[in-house]
Amino acid sequence: MPDLEAHLVPFLLVAFRLSGVFMLAPLLASVMIPGKVRILLLASLALAVYPALPPRAIAPVDFDLFTLAVAAVGETLI
């Protein structure tokens, strides 16, 4: 379980960064694409991109809930 926790925060940050793209890209932000499909596409893309991260980006970081929320907002705005 600790190994999963070490990868959870970096994976979530990748997903939040990609969610910013999904909100602003005209094709992906279209109301013609159902929300569940966009979420599935976002999760699939995050799973595909996550292994390509450099090892220092995956290093475990001690995040509390507030710090994670601030980082998530920052990643979404990028």
Image: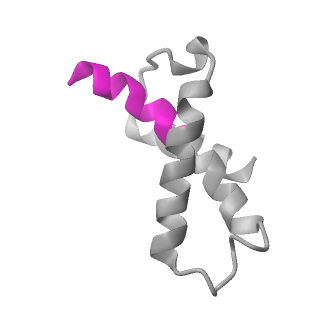
Give the residue furthest to the bottom.
32
Q: Quadrant of residue 62?
A: top left
Is residue 55 part of the magenta span, yes or no? Answer: no
Q: Nearer the viewer, residue 14 or 28?
A: 28
For the stretch drawn in magenta, the main secondary structure is: helix
Instruction: Specify start and end residues of the magenta stretch as a single range.
Output: 1-13
Side of 21 relative to 13 (left or right): right
Return the x and y of residue 12 as percentages of the image width and height. 48, 41
Give the residue furthest to the left.
1
From the image, which quarter does the N terminus lie in?
A: top left
Side of 7 relative to 69 (left or right): left
Side of 17 relative to 36 (left or right): right
Return the x and y of residue 43 as percentages of the image width and height. 48, 52
Colouring of the image: one colour
Q: How many marks?
A: 0
The residue located at (49%, 64%) in the rendering is: 39
| Up-down relation of residue 15 to residue 29 (above or below) | above
| Up-down relation of residue 34 to residue 41 (above or below) | below
Return the x and y of residue 38 as percentages of the image width and height. 55, 68
Q: Nearer the viewer, residue 11 or 47?
A: 47
Q: In which quarter of the image is residue 52?
A: top right
The residue located at (50%, 46%) in the rendering is: 69
Is residue 6 part of the magenta span, yes or no? Answer: yes
Q: Nearer the viewer, residue 21 or 70?
A: 21
The residue located at (50%, 51%) in the rendering is: 44
Side of 20 relative to 39 (left or right): right
The residue located at (45%, 41%) in the rendering is: 66
Give the residue furthest to the right.
26
Q: Which of 53 and 19 is in front in this view?
A: 53
Return the x and y of residue 33 as percentages of the image width and height. 59, 80
| Up-down relation of residue 19 to residue 70 (above or below) | below
